[in-house]
Image: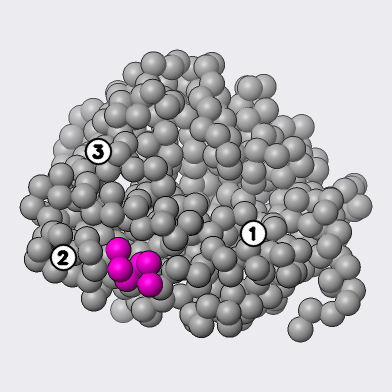
Amino acid sequence: MINFTEVRETNEMIERENLDVRTITMGISLLDCADPSLPALCNKIYEKIHRTAKDLVSVGEEIARDYRIPIVNKRISVTPISLIAGSACRTTEDYVQVAKTLDSVAKDVGVNFIGGFSALVSKSMTPADELLIRSLPQALSQTDIVCASVNVGSTKTGINMDAVRLLGNVIKETAQATADYDSIGCVKLVVFCNAPDDNPFMAGAFHGVTEGDAVLNIGVSGPGVVKTALEKVRGADFETLCETIKKTAFKVTRVGQLVAREASRRLDVPFGIVDLSLAPTPAVGDSVADILCEMGLEYAGAPGTTAALALLNDQVKKGGIMASSYVGGLSGAFIPVSEDQGMIDAVLKGALSIEKLEAMTCVCSVGLDMIAVPGDTKATTISGIIADEMAIGMINQKTTAVRIIPVAGKKAGDHAEFGGLLGHAPIMPVNAFSCDAFVNRGGRIPAPVHSFKN
């Protein structure tokens, strides 16, 4: 149980340091909704989600009010749609109809986002998988809160370069389909290597097939809390720095554990995991980049940045796993550009490039997240960037991802506005040298030798 001292500390973290529970995400299995009739499939999906999640938002608001803990988002994740819709969906338009059903029921129950319009194609694509991927430009431009993901690689299977090549074109088409809104459709699409089954964060959340019928996963954040703690040990040695981060992560995770248990009890849905990810917001003082600067860097991207991020990520996990028996998801630190004012400032100062961000992803929780690039970036270049990031995940046996936005009509140095938690982003230049012949080879990059462990 949380004691009085922890309550007082928690109140201070909430009031002064931007501590929040970023999301309560309810995962819902749709495996029992499969049907060869498209209208029947959509009806079953709507009914199952509505019945299971109808009280999610109200309970989240009750907990936030009762415990005075901000809960920023309430979200739903579902079984990857390509797994349940293959027998009913014969065209891309059929998949768009399923996406619209997800959008409709999510709005009706009042959540902020619904994830799981997804395909798992790390080794190869079924016709259903490929149709869903090709439907993404329509689906993401004709819905508001549906999020999509595609897992194109894993340490065990290698990288499906056919899917990587296809997604370069799909991302470009999605950007064009939502050109009037700074290509916001791409914000709702993420490409994964080693995607976890229990991730509560969008756009990558889906309800994995290893999960039960329904589960609650909590995403808790607090970059501002960590930065404030480090201010008190400014100039101290690395051992003190590590201990401070670890103790702070423990306290933050305890808040997530409390909310998770209480939400589980009130909704009568099993508790899954707490994801302790330092996920920034556009708010001043809620930045992962600011933590790196507090460690002693002039800007994120300066020499030493990758080492500082590795330290931060590791100590956050060490503190978190002591506070909860079920820490999972992507726990560590996110480094999105658009959602982190410190990262934006670093880009504008010239301290941070896509290449440096890629190096940082070797040690962070996810990967190249919310990267806005010029609208005329070639599809093959986007595929090459995805392939590089997938290789980092595959070789290092970790989750990596790419959420890249080629903003239609904009060039390097311009800005894109996404709004809300998504913030705004400077358009970053990309390497202009061609990778066309490499991307167009087709086939699969095989799994690394250290994958053969069974």
Q: Measuring 21% from the left and 43% from the top, which residue is drawn there?
A: 135
Q: Measuring 28% from the left and 49% from the top, which residue is drawn there?
A: 100
| Labels 2, 3: front one | 2
Q: Is residue 301 above or below residue 21?
A: above
Q: In whole angstroms, how far apart are the C-alphas of marks 2 and 3?
A: 22 Å
Q: Measuring 26% from the left and 60% from the top, which residue is drawn there?
A: 81
Q: Measuring 63% from the left and 78% from the top, which residue is drawn there?
A: 262
Residue type (three-letter) at the residue carrying disc 2: Ala
Q: Is residue 241 above or below residue 326?
A: above
Mark 1 or mark 2: name the one nearer the start of the chain.
2
Mark 1 or mark 3: name the one nearer the start of the chain.
1
Q: Which residue is mark 3?
A: 138
Q: Are marks 1 and 2 in contact (CB under 8 Å)?
A: no
Mark 2 or mark 3: name the one nearer the start of the chain.
2
| Labels 1, 2: front one | 2
Q: Which residue is mark 2?
A: 40
Query: Which structural element holds mark 1?
Result: strand
Q: Which residue is mark 1?
A: 71
Q: Is residue 125 above or below residue 213?
A: above
Residue 58, percent from left and from top: 57, 66
Query: Which structural element holds mark 3?
Result: helix
Residue type (three-letter) at the residue carrying disc 3: Gln
Location of residue 123 by image quarter: bottom left
Q: Residues within 10 Å of mark 3 (few under 14, many from 20)?
A: many
By secondary structure, the bulk of the magenta-drawn segment is best described as helix
Q: Nearer the viewer, residue 97 or 81?
A: 97
Magenta range = 46-51
